[in-house]
Each structure stands twice: as C-alpha cells, then as structure tokens.
Amino acid sequence: MNKMNTKKLYIKTWGCQMNVYDSRRMEDILSPLGYTATENPEDADMVILNTCHIREKATDKVFSEIGRLRDIKEDRAKDGKKTLIAVAGCVAQAEGDFIMERAKAVDMVFGPQAYHELPEMIIKATGERVVNTGLGVDTKFDQLPQESLNHGAAAFLSVQEGCDKFCTFCVVPYTRGAEYSRPVTQILNEAQKLADAGAIEITLLGQNVNAFHGEGPDGKIWTLARLIEELAHIKVIERIRYTTSHPCDMQEDLIFAHRDIPKLMPYLHLPVQSGSNKILKAMNRKHTAESYLEILDNVRKVRPDIAFSSDFIVGFPGETDQDFEDTMEVVKKVGYQSAYSFKYSPRPGTPAAAMQAAIVREEIKGERLTRLQGLLNSEFLKFNQKYVGQIMPVLFERKSEKSGNLQGRTPYNQSVTVAANDRLIGQIVDVAINHASPSNLRGDVVTVEMVAKSA
Ligand code: 5AD
Ligand code: SF4
C-alpha cells in the first residue's frame, strides 16, 4: 500500500457549528494528501486544534491541550514518529504570534481564512514554523475542495461568513472579518452534492446568515429568502434551516418564507442578548427589546406554531438588577423552545472590554445566570410538554448514547430519543411523543397497529 495512505489526522473542535463545518472541510482538504481521521491523538501524524475565541478562557483551554499534545509528540518522537501540531480557528487568528512564542511544540498557526492553503503550509512546516492569519475571505471558499460525500442526513452548508455588525462584546468582526456571502451557484452545487450523498436536511450557516446577499446566477443579488426558495426545489431536501441571525436583518421576505416555503422549518434562532434597552444600546445591537418582540410577533403571525431560540448574555458592563429583570421579562413573553446563555466575558480588543468602570462582579453574574437558566428551563419544558400525546415527524440523525436508541429532531428542532432500529437513521419517521424534559422528548415509532387502534 502507498505510504501516503497511512497518515492519521486528529482534529479537536471547539465552538460553533461554523467550526464543526470548517473541521470537516479541513479533513476534506487533507484527504488527497493521504490523511484519514483518527479519534486518538497518540496515533496522529497531524493534530489540528480548531479553536473558538468567542467566550471565556478559550486561550487557556488551548494551551492546556497543547501541553498534553507536546507530551504525546515527545513520546512519538522517541519511536521515530513525527507529529505536526497546528492551531486553527479564531484563537489562532487573534493570538497566533503569542501562541508561537509561548508554545514551541506548535508547528503551524492559521486563521479561518487560510484553510485552503493547508497543503502548502504542511509542506512549509516540515522545515519551518508557519503563521498564516491574513483576512482574505473572498478567496477561501473558491479554493476549498467540494464538500466530501459522507456527512449524514442532516448536513451543514456554509453560505456566509464574517460580520459587519460590531456588537461591542463580540470578536467575530475581528477574527472572521467583514461580512461575505458566497455566490449562489456555488451554494446550489454544493447543496446538490450533499443531497446526492444522502442529506435530507440542510442547515445554512453563517455568523450573520440572514444578512446573506450573494450574487445569483441572474447577476442580481439574492437574499437568504430567495436562496431558500431555490434550495427548496431540490427534491430530496425535505428540511431547510438557517443559523444564526441578527434581528435587524430579519427582512420581510424571510418572514414570509416561513409562511410560503413548507420545507423551511418552523424554527428561528434569533438572539436578543439582553432585554434592557440601555444594555442593548451599550452592546451596539441597533434594536430594542420592543422591536425584537415585534419581529417575533410578525413571524408568529405568518407561522403561528414557530419555535423561537435565542442567545443571552448576563453581566454585561453596567447591567443593573433592573436591566437583568428586563431580560427575564423578555424570556417570559416569548416562551422559548431553546436558548444559549452566557456570562459576559471581556474579549481583548472589543469596545466592551474597555468599559472598565461598569464591570459586574463574577458572583453577581453567576447568580443571574443561574436564575436565567432556571427560568429558561421551565420555559423549554412548557414548550416541550405541549407535544406530549402528539405525533411528530422526526428525522433520525444518529445512534443515541443509550444502546438500541436513536436520536432525532422534530421540525421545531426539539431533540427526540426513541428506541428504534439503526436502519431508520437518515429517515423522517412519525413518532408518538410520550415524555418531555426541558431539553429532550421521548416517544415511540408509530406502527401500523397504533394507527389502526386510534382510527
Ligand atoms: N461574552 C459572553 N458571551 C458572548 N457571546 C459572544 N461574545 C461574548 C462575550 N464576549 C455570545 C453571544 C453570541 C453567542 C454566539 O456567543 O450571545 O450570540
Ligand atoms: Fe458578533 Fe453576532 Fe454581533 Fe456579528 S451580530 S458582532 S457575530 S454577536
């Protein structure tokens, strides 16, 4: 066998779906060089840490992982084996030089815009250490190989990257660069490939995906709604989702798409971050609590059963008890299906990190997060309980940790565990829901006998 085929690649991924997607793309790029994935860093000829810089202690986590890998690298060297260690992603982008200086075991550092240059960097790294953290997103997508063919029934497709919103707490505009939308033809080709490979659900990804404005095949600029309409024509694709969005980019055509395109799932992740207008202003969010709620109302008007999800930050500089209560009020008004909530953590270089005078103590942040998550969990449970006793179409995505069970999702993005045969993976199957928790549903696959009984 060719020696090329024996190289092993270990990728550890932190952070958002965008990073998960990027890691898969890196596997694709390296496969022509003979790399195949391994779960075990001890076997790996190349290790990539695909990092996330968005919240706290990201850099510390990366350094502790590098420490563990350095030991592995030294052990492997005793057996005459070489190990390349690369740090990729947003921590690399923001702190590449610092990593190279402090961690001598690291051979390569590169940001999200340099993935297509990986093969070249590997060749360079055999002789010297490589740093590549330029921001040049418009070439990145063109030069990546096509999505590889085996990514399951629920696939991700990156359509947009970067962000021009400059929320004062956020590193994305600095690490991922300016907002960039891929050309529509490229996206449609990739979606067709995913469909050919068995995908029946596609989630369109972007840091600010509803700002999408890619060039269409007709030479005009297409909105996200227009893109979704076109993707819905791909026969085998039965479900379309998108994440993550900004309230100010929630245009009318996208709202109406939730009414007019049955394949667009009744689920919307629209982060509000805070319920206090004073804090929203300090965050440079450019919307108020009222305008956010009005947008949700407008979506609900056209799609009454839609499920909402959000991100929240507690303890942003200057947040008083009353500001926090305003956030709790928004949660009560909306009735979320799911949400992510975080303690504010200052990110170097962002405007909020300089708001020193108004820092909220860690202890208070902790108390607020606990209260918020308590309320959110009770809202999630309320949402999920509405579906007990109902039959839901569930797309089975994978085996559950519990043996003999599969894990799937409803149209509302609720996760469902069902005792079912592995052959149902990749299919949409009717499930009778019989139990709800805040983060999961349980049920039974609907059989012919059950249908006959209820008739
Ligand atoms: N501190 C806490 N949470 C943050 N997020 C982004 N930056 C920070 C920060 N500095 C959260 C926001 C965003 C989600 C992806 O991460 O809620 O929507
Ligand atoms: Fe960051 Fe999202 Fe704000 Fe853009 S819209 S700056 S990605 S939080």
Image: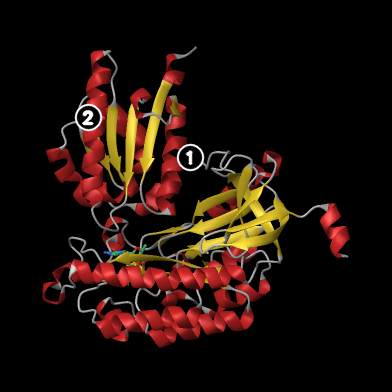
Asked where in the image residue 27 lies, by quadrant, the reply is: top left
Mark 1 secondary-structure assignment: loop
SS at mark 2? helix
* Relative horizontal placement of residue 19, taking residue 100 as reference (left or right): right
Residue 167 seen by the camera: no
User: In the rendered image of this protein, does residue 102 appear above or below residue 158?
Assistant: above
Q: Residue at x 21, y 61 (%)?
A: 347
Residue 74: quadrant of the picture: top left
Residue drawn where x is 54% and y is 84% of the image: 297
Left or right: residue 296 versus residue 102 is right
Depth order, front residue of 41/222: 41
Q: Are marks 2 and 1 in contact (CB under 8 Å)?
A: no
**Picture layout, residue 310 above or below residue 148:** below
Sequence-wise, the earlier of marks 2 and 1 is 2
- Residue 153, percent from left and from top: 62, 47
**Residue type highlighted by circle 1:** Pro
The Cα atoms of the two marked residues, 2 and 1, are separated by: 31 Å
Look at the numbered disc 2 and say if its residue's Cβ is closer than 8 Å to ligand 1. no
Question: Mark 2 or 1, which is nearer the eye?
Answer: 2
Task: Return the residue nearer the eye: 329 or 436.
Answer: 436
For label 1, the residue is 145
Where residue 229 sits: x, y (%)? 63, 66
Residue 70, disc: 2
| Residue at figure coordinates x 28%, y 58% from the top left | 55
The C terminus, quarter of image: bottom right
Amino acid found under the numbered disc labelled 2:
Arg
